[in-house]
Image (cartoon, grey):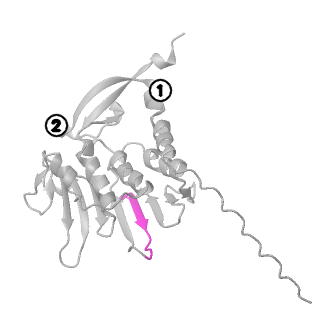
Amino acid sequence: MTDPAAQLVEQALVRPRYLAGPGDPAWVTAALHRAAGWSYGHDPLVPRVQLTSPDQLAVLHLEPDPDQPWWVVRHHRTNANPAWSVSFGARTPVEIIAAFTDALTAPAPAETASSPYEPLLAAGWQQGRDHDGLTSPDGIADVEHFSEAGSNSWFIDVAIGGDPEGQVWKAHLSGATPPHLITAVTGALAVPAPIARDPHRLPHLGHHLHTTTAQVPAPDVAFALERRIDALTARRPSNPPAPPPPRKSPAPRRHR
């Protein structure tokens, strides 16, 4: 009998990662639900997913609308911070969206003065030719912080050529989005490692897409999501012990 662990499947390793195609949405949604405790309340008969954070402050919408961003995360205003929102187009690789949601559900780091541009600069991105942001070395991806005329937003535009028909995907992050979450996205864009995809489901982007194939153990592919969820679950703090019941005040003494 063949050992299942010895079975191999072919995987395509895709570069640059922002052209890898969308991938499996469960990489984001299942991780939020099972590892971070986000609840779902959508109608199973409608092609729409809605997940809400345990504190009820953040909501993720995933809706296949051809005229709107498919992925939208909105965070309500709090006493300390204004409301913010982010959106990603349908063909955004789920690994880039997951970098954002993983950072959102992790304990917030101490604030630093680092710029979201820093991971891109370290990866060799250059000043944009026709905008104030940065452009990837291949000229396909642009990141810009637009803060003029009363606007304050971050934009990501992945497009082949100047023709609107060459648009691959785009994202928008409102200016009130916590900086470490924006940096999580730019960091994911800058990672040089390829993304694994089913070789039969690659986007048709011609010579702009660089792929190699690898034979990978079948369990590594089948259980990749489970391992991801286990790792994210492990980082959650354990439930704090319940507070002790309040002590009863002694009954007042009666005086004669």
Q: Which residues are magenta?
A: 66-79
Tell me the amino acid under the disc marked 1: Pro
Picture quarter containing residue 82? bottom left
Q: Is residue 217 above or below residue 172?
A: above
Q: Residue at x 57, y 54 (%)?
A: 44
Residue 225: within the magenta? no
Q: Is residue 213 above or below residue 54?
A: above
Report the Cα–Cα distance between label 1 and label 2. 31 Å
Tell me the amino acid under the disc marked 2: His
Q: Is residue 58 above or below residue 228?
A: below
Q: Position of residue 114 (x, y in %)?
A: 23, 59
Q: Which mark is residue 207?
A: 2
Q: Is residue 68 left or right of residue 218?
A: left
Res 112 seen here: yes
Q: Residue at x 51, y 14 (%)?
A: 3
**Of labels 1 and 2, the one closer to you:** 1
Q: Is residue 89 left or right of residue 164?
A: right
Q: Is residue 187 above or below residue 192?
A: below
Q: Position of residue 90 (x, y in %)?
A: 35, 53
Instruction: Name the magenta segment's main secondary structure.
Output: loop
Q: Residue at x 24, y 62 (%)?
A: 113
State the quadrant of the C terminus: bottom right
Residue assigned mark 1: 219
Residue at the extreme front of the image, as rendered: 256
Q: Secondary structure at mark 2?
A: helix
